[in-house]
Amino acid sequence: MTQSTGINLAVHGMNCAACVRHVENALKSVDGVEAAFVNLANAKAYVTLQPDVQVQEELLVKAIEQKGFNAHVLTAENELTAPAAAQQALNKEAQKKKRQFIFAAILTLPVFITDMGSHLIPPFAHWLHSHITTTQLGIWQFVLATLVILFPGRDFFTLGMRALFSRSPDMNSLVAIGAGSAWLYSIVALFTPQLLPLGANHLYFEAAAVVITLILLGKYLEARAKGQTGEAITRLLRLQSPTARVHRKEQWVDLPIDQIAVGDRILVRAGEAIPIDAIVLEGQSHVNEAMITGESMPITKNPNDSVIGGTINGNATLTIQATHVSSQSTLANIIRLVESAQATKLPVQNKVDAVTAWFVPIVLLVAAVVFLGWWLAGPSLNYAVVNAVAVLIVACPCAMGLAVPTSIMVATGRAAQLGVLFRQGDALQQLAQTRVVAFDKTGTLTQAKPVLHDFLLDDGVNENQLLADIASLQQYSEHPIATAIVTAAKDKGLALSQPKNMITHTGMGVSAEINALHYYLGSARLLENQDIHPSHTQKRHYEALAEQGKTPVYIACNQQVIGVLAVVDALRPEAVEAIAQLHAQGIKTAMITGDHTLTAHYVAEQLNIDVVYAQTQPGDKAKIVQQLQQHYGKTAFVGDGINDAPALAQADIGIAVGAGTDVAIESANVVLLNNDLRTSGTAIALSQATLRNIKQNLFWAFAYNIALIPLAAGLLLALTGHLFSPIYSALAMAFSSVFVVSNALRLKGFKAKSV
């Protein structure tokens, strides 16, 4: 089977939705590229290659650079350090924008004071013009505004004109055309006023300089805020200790974490971070795993218990043995999953992309129409210039490229802190629309610690011998019922035999020969299929046990039922609250189990579950999930076992509990690290909060700017008699970007609500 491979790149220089689209189109144009997604918030490009196709990484970098951006490939060696590197890049970008803003502000302030002061404060205007002529003042404004354009504002013009000439205009193009038009018009009005109509020789150096300065201020605030969006990931990275005390050559030495090998013995003192995933060899201590799983209570660790790298050892020294290298640790996998989720384009993003593809060209067209309209019908050319420039600046699509990815970055990082891993980013949107959550029972709603509780045998049957026989039959099975039976036999010190002709009857039970006796162990359906008929008393025992919420099992020997046993698997202590939490969110709940109908309904009543599917074959779980999808809509399935994998894959959202099997986790969209069912409700609530946050961002990115375009085009003048200055446009544009990022950062404070 062929598989697609991927290449991740860091991209520098992007600042709006149009930039994102240009980089994506450039990558898609490279032969062998199947798909490309660019995340403006973390400045990364994620490229999927066609199956079995090799693409030179240099071609991808070159394609990006031809669009005016810088890029480099993120290799396997630097992939885990990429979040920290991206954070540093954002911090450097913020510092660069800060320096540019301060420089621009120093140059712009005299221009702003002399121009606006002359208009607003008559005594100041009288004093100013008594010391300097209008022409001299204009020349000084020209020099200062030109310095603003040539130095702190240079990137807007170099990148903007390049994008414009390549017929892919972006935010830089709008700023360059807007501020550049005001600057050029002012030069003509200052040095060759005879070329302009009478009374049209106004200077707008102040507008050009102030627009660039304000946009740089907005970019600085935006970069500083964006630097906080990835804090959750960098905080996770900081959890990993850089060194570990390792036993080498009969002595303890401190080694860098990347030199630890599987099998190394490591000493972890009280209060230290556990450096790597491992098992405890010696010692007993309480370990705080809250930073990884979100579980607030420290967990007692004894010999043979596993510990997670990045968690904090409590009150005693532990000797542990490494089970993973640092690049394959739980912490590393969490970071990869979060990064993977951030690399996914939500369905709502496709709609945004469709709009932004046309947005900048339409804005240019609107600005041209506004200019021509005011020039032909307005009182003077000044009005045409001011209104057209205002339209260009106010409609800059900076916020559009940030609206979705910033919310995803913050939400996935916060989710990881709460013990929720989104394996795909689009799970955020899907989970927010969930209408029903279906649960597997054993190991999901229950603790998966079954106990043999009842052993009702016919007269004359030797209890210990029978227990030894059926435990022998079950000794190689990992099913919870088998575990309970084998544990009970071992607790009594019974010797087990080797079964012969072992047959697993899927979803019904098992059969085998033990000591020349042919046993059947399973459900009523198994007996029916084998034409074995229990007595009336045995049936009554079986159903009575089921009514008590226990899992009953028939025992047949040589085609004759000889007894009934029952296994009890206690409910998880948080299960009732988890179901109540989902109901409080307006979500239906269902339970799918292979247990007897009476047992299933007893458990459902204890938990207040809405819909029950009992005596279900493993292969039917996926079909039932499909029925729920058809009846209710978006369906999530929560499971932990191998037989849950098809249902997890069939569901719109598969949720695997953290203690589940690798197969279940790989089939799921969401993983609950802390093994707490309440976290499923937390994940849904967070996804709903994220979707609301995205919608708010999109409103400010689109509706807010679009609503201001008519005002900038001249509606404000018609309503109030005042022009919508390009300075107002620059303030509005900067505010929209800062608002979008700041709004997304609110998700950092998301907390799960209890019922």
Image: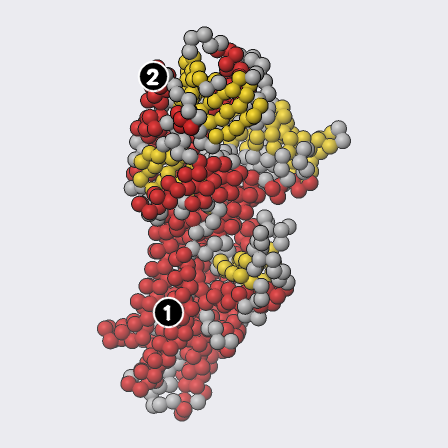
Up the image or down, 497 lies above or below 721; here it is above
What residue did someone put label 1 on? 394
Residue farthest to the bottom, as pictured: 194
What residue did someone put label 2 on? 536
Residue closer to the observer: 562 or 321: 562
**Residue shown at 57%/67% (left/top)?**
30
What's under tag 2, amino acid-wise?
His
10 Å crowding of disc 2: few (<14), some (14-19), many (20+): few
Residue closer to the observer: 172 or 676: 676
Q: Quadrant of residue 325?
A: top right
User: Residue 671's x, y, as percent?
Assistant: 47, 41
Up the image or down, 181 lies above or below 743; here it is below
**Residue shown at 49%/26% (left/top)?**
510
Q: Quadrant of residue 679?
A: top left
10 Å crowding of disc 1: few (<14), some (14-19), many (20+): many
Secondary element at image label 2: helix
Q: Note whether residue 627 is visible.
A: yes
